[in-house]
Amino acid sequence: MVAGGVGFVFTPEGKSLVKAVQRKIEPRPTPPDPDDADLLRQAEARMREDFEADMEALRGQLKAARDAAKKASESGQEVVLPPVNEHTASSGGDVRRLRSEITLETRVELEKGGLASIERKSADAYKASYKLQVRLPKASTTLAELEQVSPKLGEILPGLPAMLEKPEVSRWFYVLYDNKTQRVKRDAALLNELLTRHNFYDCETILNLRHPGSGRRVFLMQAEMDVVSDGSDGDRLATMPDAIVNSTHYQPFTSYGWRKRTSTPNPMVAGWEQRIRNADAELADPATTADRKAWLRDRKEYLKRGIADMKARSFLIAEYDPFIVIPVNLLTASGDPWAPKVGDYAVVVHAGILYPAIVGDGGPTFKVGEASLRMARQINPQASPYSRPVSDLTVTYVVFPGSREKEREAPDYEKWRSKCGQLLDEIGGIGSGKTLFEWKNLLPQPQSQPPTDP
């Protein structure tokens, strides 16, 4: 299946990223899901807003006319309507903002023209000019700049000042903002909703650093933190809530996966098999359109591949495993020794605490700064799939390119912590009084079975 220009193939060995999902990569257009009426609700809401605005204006005009008639009647004067022999509309006014956090200055300019039968044929008679101005940010390159958003970062990572003597802005910083601007240009040309200012400026810097002593490479990024809530693993979590199992949005896969070890089925398989049965029922319905049937057949093939993969492999579980998300174009890039890969070790620094993790998933190419729900809730207990833990660009992501293990295995938090500690030692260690955070296993532990009678 191809999505967003990147091919993804499910394989038992898991040699490719399993991320042909709507939320991760920009998907090709598909018919609306009849169970998801969001677009209809949005359209209805806009129509309702427009209608109510028009009615409010009419009510105001009617009230003014009644007040004038009442005043004239009370004074004994005859109500005389003013003559209308000129256009009375004037320039000015404003329209609804295209998107929150974007300042939109608008003005309707009117001028006298010719006959309507002529003007309706003139492109210049009724036109609009729209210019969106965007300032592209520069990347932080000095310790002082990095510490503006992450105070005392040089004390937390004492080897950082030496690495910043020859900083190199990563090409991916520029690629990221180019992808953002291409997206904005496309949506602006169609008068679609645009990225908010908050989401446009979600990355402070991306740097390629190297420790002068050990030669260890570091991919350093400063950004916010959004939440990913994907993943499943029947070996470690045999049951999941029905709302997740039956969800058409929850993705059972993460880019980091390993060979399944037990015969316990992945709990998400049941929901995906039910979706195939639902598709079969809709395909058998004579009322189903040809376009919808084509989409359903394609969807069935995707579901079948996914089920096969869930039967062969296990994945990280965002609610329980600490991992970070890197744009998928970096994960699949070749020729850049600083570009992170799936499984590389990473340390997340926020509010003076160092959290060991791995690169566990791939995300969109136009945004950065995502971590698993487990990581997010540790930083901010109020975090959820719908509420980011950190909205400011105060999270520092330190990734060690080329550090991943040769074979992928189920998460071992203590091993991750030990390996991250070793890698930090290669770039100058951590500051006095600081330690790496210790993750606890929160997965439900299987209950021991009572011995059977002989």
Image (cartoon, grey):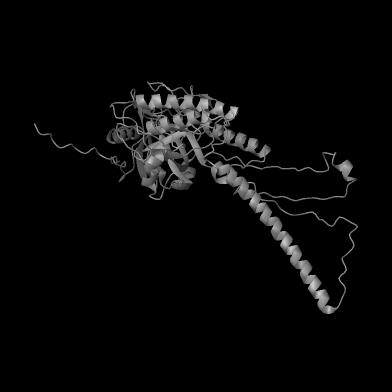
Q: Quadrant of residue 197?
A: top right
| Left or right of residue 429, residue 25 in this image | right
* Of the pair 139 and 382, the residue shown nearer to us: 382
Which residue occupies 59% across, 27% down?
Answer: 290
410 or 114: nearer the viewer: 114
On the picture, is 393 further left or further right than 135? left
Q: On the picture, is 130 further left or further right than 140? A: right
Place of residue 53 in the rendered image (x, y in percent of width and height, measured from the top left): 68, 56
Q: Quadrant of residue 11?
A: top left
**Residue farthest toward the front in the current orientation of the protein:** 286
- Does residue 254 appear anywhere in the picture? no
- The front one of 321 and 390 is 321
Q: Quadrant of residue 310?
A: top left
Q: Is residue 107 visible in the rendered structure shown here?
A: yes
- Residue lying at the far bottom in this picture: please name it: 75
- In this rendering, the count of numbered labels is 0
Residue sitting at 72 percent across and 59 percent down?
57
For residue 231, above or below residue 335:
below
**Residue 15: where, in percent of width, then height?**
41, 21
